[in-house]
Image (tube, rainbow, N blue to C red):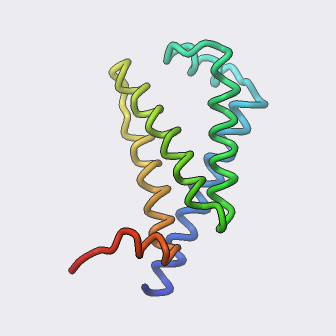
Amino acid sequence: MSNKLIWTGRILSGLTGVIMLTIGLSILFARSAEVMDGFAKFGYPVNAIAPIGWATLVGSVLYLIPRTAVLGAIVLTGYFGGAVATHLRISDSFIAPLMAGIFVWLGLFLRDGKVRALFPLRR
């Protein structure tokens, strides 16, 4: 794989990981009106904020560490799957969490040869 594609994967992974880290921190610690309104809009109780925030935070930290990136991608995939289901449940657009999940795996695929070996692209 070319160096450009590897760096594209690193940049995509870095951006996705940092964005998710920021979201996890804001869910857990900021508890802004926007976060509280979002949880209320989707019908989640206040006691669901901490587990969802921790899943986001832990998944993004694991994803940003190269040795644990696959585990982080799996945790974030669960998070994004829940987000897609939540959006579908209230007939809201689910494109953003779906694309974020795709970016997580695309970034990992481009930057990690072992992941590429698991999912070889055929010509």
| Quadrant containing the C terminus in the rendered view | bottom left
Task: Please tell me which residue is depicted at 40% across the width and 70% down the height of the picture.
Answer: 118
Q: Quadrant of the N terminus?
A: bottom left
Which of the 4 image quadrants contains residue 15?
Answer: bottom right
Q: Nearer the viewer, residue 40 or 81?
A: 81
Given residues 76 and 67, the one toward you in this image is 67
Horizontal and vertical percent for residue 82?
47, 32
Q: In front here: 82 or 9? A: 82
Q: How many numbered circles are shown?
A: 0
Hey, which residue is sitting farthest right in the picture? 29
In this picture, is 51 found above or below 75?
Answer: above
Q: Is residue 58 left or right of residue 13?
A: right
Q: Residue lying at the far left in this picture: please name it.
A: 123
User: Based on the displayed image, in which of its 4 quarters is residue 93 positioned?
Assistant: top left
In the visual, does 61 lie left or right of 40?
right
Q: Residue at x 45, y 40 (%)?
A: 97
Q: Quadrant of residue 84?
A: top left
**Would you place residue 95 above or below residue 12 in this image?**
above
User: Which residue lies most toward the front here?
Assistant: 118
**Location of residue 34 in the rendering, given as x and y in whole percent from the top left corner:** 63, 23
* Residue 105 at x, y percent in the picture: 46, 59
* Residue sitting at x 62%, y 30%: 52
In percent of the image, x 36 and y 20: which residue is there? Answer: 89
Rendered view: 108 above or below 78: below
